[in-house]
Amino acid sequence: MAEKFDAIVIGTGQAAPALCARLDKEGLKTAVIERKLLGGTCVNVGCVPTKTLVASARAVHIARRGGDYGFRAEDIRVDMKAVKARKDGVVKQSSDGLAAWIARMKNVTLIRGHARLVAPRKVIVEGRELEAERVFINVGGRALVPDLPGVGDVATLTNTTMMEIDAVPEHLLIVGGSYIGLEFAQMYRRFGSQVTVIERAAKLLPREDDDVAAEIRAVLEREGVALRTGAECMALRRKGERIAVEMECKGGEPIAQGSHVLLAVGRKANTDDLGLKEAGIDADERGYIKVDDECRTSAEGVWALGDCNGRGAFTHTSYNDYEIVAANLFDNDKRRISDRIPAYALFIDPPLGRAGMTEAEARKSGRRLLMGKMPMKHVGRAREAGETQGFMKVLVDADSKELLGAALLGLNGDEIVHSLLDMMYAKRPYTTIQRAVHIHPTVTELIPTLLGQLKPL
């Protein structure tokens, strides 16, 4: 006989714990099911560990640049075991805190095991049958392993297995020139690896504006990262004790050899063993669960949140899915996914902070456009910090004067972009922030100057 609950939550990614807390507050008897790691990708193999590694790599990089700042640091050596131990400690602190939070919820029961739907609101987990009026799916995604010739014949790494590396690879080959691949590329180059990035598209970050992608390429090449773009017909094979990636490129050798290979070509939803068909839940051809503007699936009483619904691939969009679901269920507040303004960051150094439309998207919109662009070398705070790579770019609707998009590639760009994002949500004219008085000396104080240089696009 099925155990009765008011709600069942499958998976503990970034939406689930907060959702459980709200269900607990509403006095709803809730089962939350996790088959592996509390916190999902972000806490265990994504944001938390990678940004911890990025911080270690930056510390090494700054030490090597001591001469630029008037000091000399001798004999800089990377202890990768210590770097990994630091990363593991930060992850443990996060996962332990999450476990303690869930344990404090009076109406929430954590069940370990693999959950499979056998009906729209009925779940089997480790031989137990659970039933509830509401089911929330937050199972996330995992690294996609591409169907390349030879991929099963050599040892490969993903963003997950990279977390177990405790020695600096001699030469890291990275297949995929987008966000995950580029963060690992710079990180391990700074740790001391030779790094080669191999991207099938004609440029890095294929969806980015050409000027942004070109400057990111220049940043990485200045640090000695080898970049191979336009790499068609890739294949992997063993070559003695090394691994080779064979390719067809317009330029460069048709082969790259290294000691390790990281596959960073995309993600896939963790839905193939969830029982979607039995539950009457529609998914697309890639396995992403189809949802409406309030995260509801095709099955009555079932919601899908986070990466598995294909409506966002970030921790912040997953958490926003929780906010949308809670607002509609409990607060009589009609929040929608379509109200969300795209925003994300690339955490290389310097970081890229992006909000709203790209230049290409703005051009396609048919609006009359204004654009402002400023190199970071014109920003006093960047010069003082010795961090002058990159530029800031903003796009404005010439008629409404509303901000449409921003790309801030430079010192603190991942933080500064939020001042522009907030103006986009407020739907205020750009003159509002242009006339604001900002603190000196900061990078943000140059935003009004940038907006004063708008020109027709």
Image: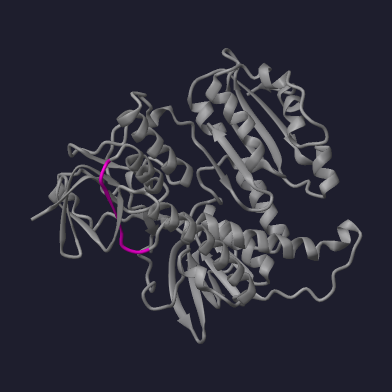
Which residue is painted at 69% across and 36% down in the image?
392
Kindly give the residue lying farthest to the left in the view shown. 1
Q: How is the image coloured?
A: one colour
Asked if one can make out residue 226 in the rendered structure from this viewpoint, the answer is no
Q: Is 37 in front, or is 231? A: 37
Q: Residue at the spot x=78%, y=36% of the render?
A: 442
Residue 422 image position (x, y, % from top left): 58, 28
| 111 to 385, vertically: above or below | below
Give how far across and how far down residue 325 sits, in percent: 34, 35
Q: Nearer the viewer, residue 233 or 90?
A: 90
**On the picture, is 140 further left or further right than 30?**
right
Q: Which residues are magenta?
A: 28-36
Instruction: Give the residue at x 64% y 50%.
Output: 216
From this view, report whether residue 166 is shown above or below residue 71: below
- Residue at left offset 78%, top offset 73%: 76
Quadrant in which the C terminus is drawn: top right
**Viewer-proximal residue among 153 and 269:** 269
Q: In the rendered view, would you say 232 is above or below 14? A: below
10 relative to 317 in the view: left or right: left
> In the displayed structure, does residue 372 sit left or right of residue 287?
right
Q: Is residue 367 left or right of residue 291?
A: right
Task: For the N terminus, give its image quadrant.
Answer: bottom left
Residue 380 horizontal/vertical position (percent): 84, 38
Q: Is residue 81 magenta?
A: no
Q: Is residue 399 visible?
A: yes
Q: Quadrant of residue 186?
A: bottom right
Viewer-closest of 85 and 456: 85
